[in-house]
Amino acid sequence: MLQACLESLAALKKPPEFSVYVMANTSQDTLTQFENTLPQKLSEKLDIKFFSLGQNTGFTGAANAGITASTEDLVILLNDDTTVDPNWLTELVATHSTTGADMIASTIYLGNKTTLDSQGFTFRWRGQALTLPFTDTASDNWKNHPDLLSRTNAREPFGPDAAAALYTRQLLQDLRGFRPSFFAYLEDVDLSLRARRVGFTCALAENAIVFHHKHATSSGFSGFKARQDFRNWWRIVLGSYPLKAWTRFAPRILLERAKNLSGMIKAWK
């Protein structure tokens, strides 16, 4: 899948200048073996920098390492189990240029290339991040409580799916990237919430299209996603929520966490 991802980047149409940082949660020997299997044309078309992290640091560890290793003003995260439309990168950068938003969401389809999966997500204070379909009508939707965030008149969506998202370096530096304790799942929700609380904004690049073979890695580990969802939602509501959100929504927050617990128990059976 990683090779297919790189080949789709090599097929981009007239993209802005960019470099590719491959952050590998594996040993240098394994990474070198992979590099040796790549067609020569990829290294000719792409400026690829490979980094071995030596162990599994999760999504957050790899993403933070890539953010630190890179120097560009715009940082774009892309999962290795994705392929991109030839105009994807151009559309992402153009949307940032025209909107000035600090986070840009891609339009993400599943690997079958027909099922629309995400155009970013909206946020509910009970502890829900909803992709498609979603509405802003829930009483605890973020837009209905402007006093809980420094800016709520920003462009939709609330935040981008980090499987294919653009962030400004200023945002990543100010917030110190993803919280490493998350390891995987919901780290993008936490980052977006922290970003929204200090005034950063988000926009959708509707024509920046990505195809995602969702959960290609974690599906091999029984109960892993459910366990991470349970743990990481608690990290969000305890570590990133303003006190006023707890005061206002405590019963809903606790009920939603009970649902997470139920889902985790069912996944283990």
Image: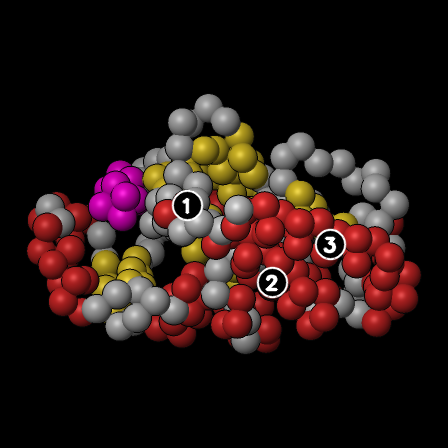
Q: Secondary structure at mark 1?
A: helix
- Up the image or down, 253 lies above or below 242; here it is above
Q: Amino acid at mark 2?
A: Asn
In the image, the segment drawn in magenta is 1-11
| The N terminus: image quadrant | top left
What amino acid is at disc 1? Ser
Q: Position of residue 268 (x, y in %)?
A: 52, 50
Alpha-carbon span between mark 2 and mark 1: 18 Å
Q: Residues within 10 Å of mark 3 (few under 14, many from 20)?
A: few
First in sequence: mark 1 or mark 3?
Answer: 1
Residue at numbered disc 3: 258
Q: Secondary structure at mark 2?
A: helix
| Residue 132 visible in the displayed image | yes
Q: Amino acid at mark 3?
A: Ala
Label 3 element class: helix
Marks 2 and 3 sit apart, C-alpha to C-alpha, by 13 Å
Q: Can the viewer see residue 103?
A: no
**Can residue 5 be found in the magenta stretch?**
yes
| Rendered residue at 53%/46% (across/down) | 269
User: Could you say which disc has been placed on residue 232 in the image?
Assistant: 2
